[in-house]
């Protein structure tokens, strides 16, 4: 059986990280190496889907919930506007194969992020 992902270990309390919001299906943490004034990760609790392509095919309602939780977190913590990024595959920068959305928010223009 595959090793649990870092995100599963965080969810189970084995690796310390504040879970700043959650639903029955999804949880939200701050990225350990923020790339924007606000950088959150929205993560399905199930480790079943490796990336967003698998998630969209296997459980589109869960993907919609990830988007909706991202919007709420961006509203609660940074005024509501946000960029949603799913790195998909190693050459696109994916390092953890337990699907997660990066929520980048705050004043991205001022932060030099376009
Ligand atoms: P990926 O590169 O797979 O798209 O994104 C993985 C993200 O997880 C990276 O942005 C990385 O900084 C973040 N990350 C890796 N390990 C940890 C950790 O232990 N705690 C938190 N909060 N974030 C982590």
Image (cartoon, helix red, strand yellow):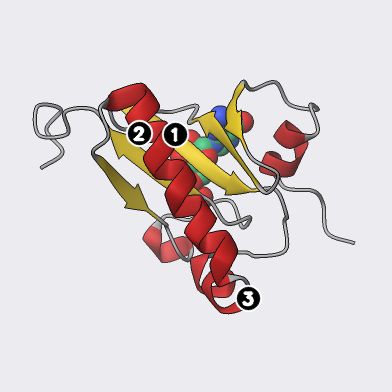
Q: Quadrant of residue 23?
A: top right
Q: Are marks 1 and 2 in contact (CB under 8 Å)?
A: yes
Q: Nearer the viewer, residue 80 or 34?
A: 80
Mark 1–mark 3 distance (CA, rounded to whole Å):
24 Å
Identify the residue at horizontal 45%, vertical 64% (top origin): 88
Q: Which residue sits furthest bottom?
A: 57
At a point 59% along the width and 61% down the height, the residue shown is 62
Question: Which residue in the structure is indicated by mark 3?
Answer: 58
Residue 4 appears left or right of 23 = right
| Helix, strand or loop status at disc 1 | strand
Q: Residue furthest right?
A: 1
Q: Secondary structure at mark 3?
A: helix
Q: Is residue 78 left or right of residue 68?
A: left
Q: Is 36 situated left or right of 54 in this image? A: left
Residue underneath mark 1 = 40
Considering only order in the chain, which callout, 2 or 1, is on the residue closer to the N terminus? 1
Ligand 1 near label 1 (Cβ, under 8 Å)? no
Q: Which residue is mark 2?
A: 74
Between residues 34 and 38, which one lies in front from this camera angle? Answer: 38
Q: CA distance from mark 2 to mark 3?
A: 26 Å
Is the distance from the Cβ of mark 3 to the nearest ligand 1 atom less than 8 Å? no
């Amino acid at each position: 059986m595959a090793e649990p992902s870092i995100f599963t270990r965080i969810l189970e309390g084995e690796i310390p990280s504040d879970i700043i919001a959650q639903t029955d299906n999804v949880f939200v943490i701050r990225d350990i190496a923020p790339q924007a004034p606000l950088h959150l990760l929205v993560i399905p609790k199930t480790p079943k889907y490796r990336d967003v392509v698998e998630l969209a095919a296997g459980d589109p309602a869960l993907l919609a919930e990830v988007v909706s939780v991202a919007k709420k977190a961006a509203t609660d913590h940074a005024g509501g506007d946000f960029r949603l990024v799913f790195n998909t595959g190693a050459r696109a920068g994916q390092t953890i194969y337990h699907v997660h959305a990066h929520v980048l928010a705050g004043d991205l223009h001022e932060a030099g992020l376009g």
